[in-house]
Amino acid sequence: MDAASLLTGLLLGALLATAVTLGVVTLSARRRPEGSGLEPVHESLDHLHRLLAGMERARATAHGELREQMGTVGQTSDQLKHETAALVTALRTPHVRGRWGEVQLRRVVEVAGLLEHCDFVEQPSGVNDQGAGVRPDLIVTLADGRQVIVDAKVPFSGYIEAVQATDQAVRDQRVQMHARQLRAHVDALAARRYPTAFRPAAPFTVLFVPSDGFLTTALEAEPGLLEYGFARDVVLATPSTLLALLRTVAYSWRQERLARDADQVLEVGRRLHARLSTLSGHLTRLGSALGTTMTRFNETVGSYERSVLTAARRFDDLGIAESPVPEPEPLEATIRALRPEAPASPDSFDLLEDDEPLVARDGTGG
């Protein structure tokens, strides 16, 4: 029940109550002396009159607002109808229909997380094995280097006519036409032989249907349409199924990049290990050389003490020399050898100063 009907009912009820009240007042006036007891009745009638006037004003205001709202709804409906007709007219044009399919395909690819010119390429050109030039809408590159070809030019004028049909028989006829159009497009797509124009490519072509409703309606008339496409190496995919496929491709690309990074880390580690081995060899030879040098120094000191210094002391004994000849001290040190079989823990050394050596916590130097 709307506001106008409710106000009309209340007004009729108030009028009926007024008539009953006036009837009672008339009967009372006939039975009572003139002018006695009529003042309360007049007051009640005045109050009722004011109440009815307020209800009438409220009803008029509500009716005006309702009329204004209905006018706005009517204008919006007309505008929506006009825009819908313009959209339907535009979608009947093959160029606009193809462009809309390309935009839908691009949105699905972006949502899947693929990168342009890295994971996919739009509108590439190629030549198939029959020498004919082909140009699919999209080529998705898999992690193993293979390519998946996607085409988005799908006719759906029959679907639009089926949606606009008011008669069930006409709708069924247009749905059948839509299924035939999609089937014919599968044949045309298979005849283009996209996989032979781009190598290495997967041995099938993805036919992108921009809306799930397009494919669902076609399957109502021809349930075997998917199998028909599979037999001709054409896979029919809606936005939901293609998104799942592309997300799988994006995941494989991420795993490939992680594996490639891991291989690079492994190669750097191998090079570092080889260089550490070379440096360890240099340190070992340097330590051996230092040990040999100290041995030769001590031997030279001993020969000097035995052969030369004895004769020099004779000058000291004769009082010829002004000062005694200094005596060199032999070197007493041990060269620490590298022990790869027992590497030291990183926590077992404390770095004191930049110019100080590493000192082990057990007190031994190195």
Image: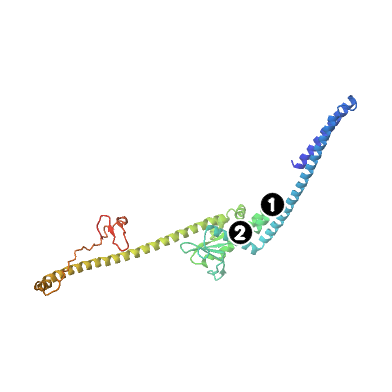
Q: Nearer the viewer, residue 322 or 9?
A: 322
Residue 364, position in %: x, y? 24, 57
Q: Is residue 92 left or right of residue 120?
A: right
Q: Nearer the viewer, residue 99 or 80?
A: 80
Color scheme of the displayed model: rainbow
Residue 57, position in %: x, y? 80, 42
Residue assigned mark 1 = 169
Identify which amino acid the numbered label 1 is placed on: Ala
* Measured Cα–Cα span from mark 1 to mark 2: 20 Å
Determine if residue 238 is in view.
no
Q: Nearer the viewer, residue 164 or 83?
A: 83
Q: Nearer the viewer, residue 320 or 217?
A: 320
Q: Quadrant of residue 366?
A: bottom left
Residue assigned mark 2 = 182
Identify which amino acid the numbered label 2 is placed on: Leu
User: Which quarter of the rendering shows the N terminus?
Assistant: top right
Q: Quadrant of residue 161?
A: bottom right
Determine if residue 243 is in view.
yes
Sequence-wise first label, 1 or 2: 1
Residue 78, position in %: x, y? 73, 54
